[in-house]
Image (cartoon, helix red, strand yellow):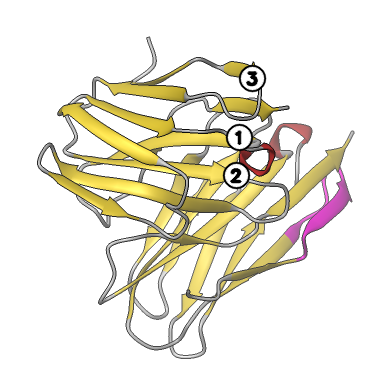
Amino acid sequence: ILNVEQSPQSLHVQEGDSTNFTCSFPSSNFYALHWYRWETAKSPEALFVMTLNGDEKKKGRISATLNTKEGYSYLYIKGSQPEDSATYLCAFIGNAGNMLTFGGGTRLMVKP
Amino acid sequence: DADVTQTPRNRITKTGKRIMLECSQTKGHDRMYWYRQDPGLGLRLIYYSFDVKDINKGEISDGYSVSRQAQAKFSLSLESAIPNQTALYFCATSERHREPQHFGDGTRLSIL
């Protein structure tokens, strides 16, 4: 069983704050890392699929970076808004695997 | 209409009952997955299928079985439900096994 960890488990920020959280994963046999956004009572939605070391992806105020050599990815949210409140999940897939292994998620709550 | 539809959305049942959760998709994807979500544990893979004739166990398949009746349909069964199978269950699809996954809205299952 692969070890994919996310930190922190939960985070409270004020509207307008920028924030970031971490996903750590095995640094060997890396193939891809996924980020998903999961709002309460809805289905998880894909944000990014990252495959290259040093990759940086951006969607609006959300961006992510990838370091495959040391086994971590950061997700950044600039100027958090209440609608950003959700659980953010990362998931790792290795070269030898067919399955995504998910981290436990970071639950973000943005207060107006 | 949702691309990935799960039924039922909620179910309460008793220990020992047989339960079937159904998933259908209109995305035309060959790959389908069943996950369960428990608080703090992220999503854990139960079973996955890469086409109608291909079924594979995931991380936590004990106590579950699946059927891939057609490309668009993938059902999950609990032959004899037990309380520790109380969880939120998600079905997902993907075009290729390393591409972003598309999730249904989930089935909340409670076993008394």
As drawn, the label of residue A45 is none
Say which residue appears at 52% left-offset and 38% top-offset. Answer: A44
Residue pointed to by mark 1: B88
Q: Secondary structure at mark 3?
A: strand
Q: How much space separates mark 1 and mark 2, taking CA atoms?
A: 5 Å
Which part of the image, by quadrant, shows the C terminus of chain A?
top right
Mark with earlier residue (3, 1): 3
Q: Is residue A68 above or below residue A17?
A: below
Q: Is residue B89 left or right of A41 when viewed as pictured?
A: left
Crowd around label 2: few <14 · some 14–19 · many ≥20 (10 Å): some
**Label 2 marks which chain's residue?**
B
Crowd around label 3: few <14 · some 14–19 · many ≥20 (10 Å): some
Q: Check disc 3 and give the amino acid type.
A: Thr
Q: Secondary structure at mark 2?
A: strand
Quick check: marks 1 and 2 in contact, CB under 8 Å? yes
Say which residue appears at 67% left-offset and 44% top-offset. Answer: B84
Quick check: marks 3 and 1 in contact, CB under 8 Å? no
Q: Position of residue A13 (x, y in %)?
A: 87, 50
As drawn, the label of residue B37 is 2
The answer to whether residue A79 shows anywhere in this view is no
Q: Check disc 2 and give the amino acid type.
A: Gln
Q: Check disc 1 and give the amino acid type.
A: Leu
Residue pointed to by mark 3: B13
- Label 3 or label 2, whichever lies nearer to me, is 3
Q: Position of residue A75 (x, y in %)?
A: 60, 62
Mark with earlier residue (3, 2): 3
Q: Which residues are magenta?
A: A8-19
Nearer-the-camera pick, A76 or B42: B42
Nearer-the-camera pick, A37 or B30: B30
